[in-house]
Amino acid sequence: MVQVTWKGNVKRTEDVGRKTEDINDTIIDMEKRLENLRVWNDARTLVLCIYEIMRDCHDYGFKDQIQRASVSIMNNIAEGFDAGSDDLFVRYLNIAKASSSEVKSMLYLCEDLGFCTIDKREELMSQLVSIAAQLSSLISFLKKK
């Protein structure tokens, strides 16, 4: 098991070799990977779900907008992750959070227009609430550093 925080004093525990080491002011390259961010992975899952429900939609303007907004969540997390500073990362995370609100709004329309069921909208809303909460937590953490 590896525990990672963003640039700071980290206690790292590995199952392999059962060793613990302190890492100050940096993250080992192996750990500082976008793919290790749960919020990015959750956003990626959301994108796949949005693409799936919109597969047969012929309202191409609507389809394009909700897909782009969902991809924006994932991509802004990625861009911010490698932006070079915590301040820039926070800026990109705020954009990702705003995009999650756009997707949330569009999901109501998606239901209203018959592109998804109430149950599917609620399932996706639950994912969005989780993503937004994770983004808020990460933003707060980075601002306190």
Image (cartoon, rainbow, N blue to C red):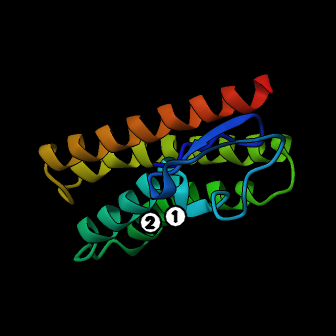
From the viewer's side, name the closer residue of 119 and 32.
32
Closer mark to the observer between disc 1 and disc 2: 1
Q: Quadrant of residue 59?
A: bottom left
Identify the residue at image location x=48%, y=63%: 65
Question: Which residue does the numbered mark 2 point to in the structure image?
Answer: 67
Q: Is residue 19 left or right of residue 143?
A: left
For the residues bearing labels 1 and 2, Cβ distance under 8 angstroms: yes
Hey, which residue is sitting farthest top in the picture? 144
Of helix, strand and loop, which one carries label 1?
A: helix
Q: Quadrant of residue 122?
A: top left
- The amino acid type of the residue labelled 1 equals Val
Label 2 neighbour load within 10 Å: few <14, some 14-19, many 20+: some
> CA separation, marks 1 and 2?
6 Å
Q: Quadrant of residue 94?
A: top right
Q: Position of residue 58 (x, y in %)?
A: 28, 76
Q: Position of residue 108 (x, y in %)?
A: 31, 43
Q: Is residue 92 left or right of residue 111?
A: right
Q: Is residue 144 above or below residue 7?
A: above
Q: Position of residue 74 (x, y in %)?
A: 54, 59
Label 1 neighbour load within 10 Å: few <14, some 14-19, many 20+: many
Q: Is residue 54 left or right of residue 15?
A: left
Identify the residue at image location x=43%, y=60%: 66
Question: Which residue does the numbered mark 1 point to in the structure image?
Answer: 71
Q: Position of residue 16 (x, y in %)?
A: 46, 58
- The amino acid type of the residue labelled 2 equals Gln
From the viewer's side, name the closer residue of 117 and 43.
43
Of helix, strand and loop, which one carries label 2?
A: helix
Q: Is residue 144 left or right of residue 48?
A: right
